[in-house]
Image: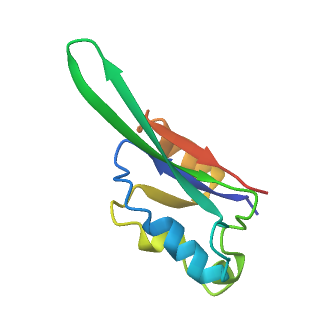
Amino acid sequence: MSKNGLLINYEYCTGCHTCEVACQQEHDFPVGKCGIKVTEYVYAADKKPVAVDFMPFVTELCDLCIERNRNGELPACVKHCQSFCMSFGPIDQLAAQMQKTPRSALFAPW
């Protein structure tokens, strides 16, 4: 059995924080605790407009919603992602998918 992971194509993340809210509600985490945290990066460049990237990072609290997986459901963050920038599945398949999406990150929390 292959290990599962989470692939995030951060080029399309809009910074809506829905993944954080879904995670907190799914696991009943207190305020300030979450299995995924969206970080904002602002870039200023000469003669170019300011650019903003949002990157969801998996934290030590993430278990990829193992209980949801046992019931055949996606992790809460993936299910509720409004920009569809998150994928869940076997790491080898996600790594192959990652080759087509250069601005992405692959997480395997355990």
Asked which colour scheme the image uses, the reply is rainbow
- Residue extending furthest bottom? 71
Write the residue at 39% across / 39% down. 53
Foreground residue among 31 and 70? 31
In the image, residue 80 lies at what x, y percent? 43, 73
In the image, residue 13 lies at what x, y percent? 38, 51
Write the residue at 33% across / 60% down. 83
Foreground residue among 62 and 52? 52
Asked which quadrant contains residue 68, the reply is bottom right
Write the residue at 21% across / 19% down. 48
Residue 75 seen in this snapshot: no
Asked which quadrant contains residue 18, the reply is bottom left
Foreground residue among 81 and 40? 40
- Residue extending furthest right? 110
Residue 16 against residue 93 in the figure, above or below: below
Asked which quadrant contains residue 43, the reply is top left
Residue 19 seen in this snapshot: yes
- Residue extending furthest front? 31
Write the residue at 74% across / 64% down. 61
Q: Is residue 109 left or right of residue 24?
A: right
> Which corner quadrant holds the C terminus?
bottom right
> Which corner quadrant holds the N terminus?
bottom right
Residue 43 against residue 17 in the figure, above or below: above
In the image, residue 70 lies at what x, y percent? 69, 83
